[in-house]
Image (cartoon, rainbow, N blue to C red):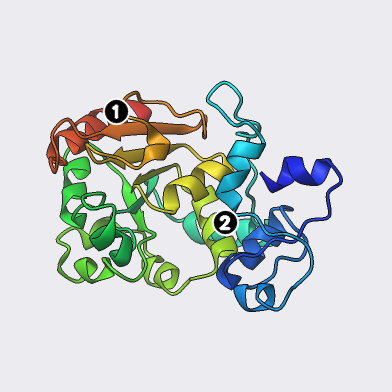
């Protein structure tokens, strides 16, 4: 939503976590984002929370204001990962299964699922996985019984925390399948096809029903029919994945 505001000729400062700064610059969203520390030292002007822009821009399902791809990575990074991943012989599916531990415990329980649930996708599909999981949840990789189905460069990807380079890797995937965390909006903001797995009681942004969302035209929603039942979700995704491939 900074893009339509900038078109209005407004003088904007944008405060964001430093780990996002390279992605924000590479995407042309803002030329010089500032850190929370720098933000606290500014005394002039007025600040507004980013989500409050939805009200002031009159965003609705019929008036999304912006839902075309707005995130991109540097061409050099995309070329780098195109070469690295070109050795893979099977379709590449990027996955994520856990979100922030704090949010999981405090206000959005049930949005995550065990990594082992993704084994269902391998029963009918010849695919390779890329894990985009960071921090909480990565320990499940140690006991994963389908490690051979991850790309050969997975260890290298595990060490990447830069969002701009992550975006470049996403662009070289065939599809992203993820629980409701930052990976979904990141990939959909790039314009990549994303299948988002939702709990029976999802976050408000996704509504209570339907497979589509006005936020992101390239995103498809896969909802639980019963709270906590990911098996049905994975069964449906497995069938749809076969058609997709």
Q: Classify 214 as above or below 31.
A: above
Give the structural element (helix, strand or loop) at label 1: helix
Please indicate, yes or no, whether residue 141 appears anywhere in the rendered image: yes
Q: Residue at x 13, y 34 (%)?
A: 226
Give the structural element (helix, strand or loop) at label 2: helix
Q: Say the numbered circle drawn on residue 167.
A: none
Tell whether 8 sits left or right of 147.
Answer: right
Residue 210 found in image quarter: top left
Residue sitting nearer the eye, 34 or 129? 34
Give the mark count. Answer: 2
Q: Is the N terminus in the top left, top right, bottom left or bottom right quadrant?
A: top right
- Furthest toward the right, the residue is 9
Q: Position of residue 52 (x, y in %)?
A: 58, 46
Please name the residue that numbered disc 1 is placed on.
240
Please indicate, yes or no, whether residue 195 appears anywhere in the rendered image: no
Specify few, some or many for label 2: CA neighbours under 10 Å numbering under 14, 14-19, or 20 or more.
many
Please name the residue that numbered disc 2 is placed on.
168
Residue sitting nearer the eye, 232 or 39? 39
């Amino acid at each position: 939503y900074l893009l339509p505001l900038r078109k209005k000729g407004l003088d904007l400062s944008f405060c964001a976590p430093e780990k996002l700064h390279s992605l924000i610059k590479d995407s042309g969203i803002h030329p010089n984002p500032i850190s929370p520390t720098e933000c606290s030292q500014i005394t002039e002007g007025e600040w507004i929370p980013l989500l409050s822009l939805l009200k002031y821009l009159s965003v609705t399902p019929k008036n999304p204001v912006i839902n075309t791809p707005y995130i991109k990575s540097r061409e050099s990074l995309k070329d780098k990962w195109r070469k690295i991943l070109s050795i893979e012989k099977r379709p590449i599916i990027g996955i994520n299964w856990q979100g922030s531990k704090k949010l999981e415990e405090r206000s959005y329980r049930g949005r995550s699922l065990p990594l082992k649930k993704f084994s269902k996708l391998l029963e009918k599909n010849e695919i390779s996985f890329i894990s985009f999981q960071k921090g909480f949840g990565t320990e499940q990789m140690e006991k994963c019984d389908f490690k051979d189905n991850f790309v050969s460069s997975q260890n290298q990807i595990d060490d990447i925390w830069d969002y701009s380079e992550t975006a470049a890797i996403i662009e070289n995937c065939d599809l992203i399948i993820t629980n409701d965390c930052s990976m979904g909006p990141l990939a959909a903001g790039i314009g990549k096809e994303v299948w988002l797995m939702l709990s029976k009681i999802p976050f408000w942004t996704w509504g209570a029903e339907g497979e589509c969302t006005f936020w992101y035209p390239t995103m498809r929603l896969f909802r639980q029919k019963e709270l906590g039942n990911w098996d049905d979700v994975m069964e449906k995704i497995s069938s749809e994945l076969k058609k997709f491939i």
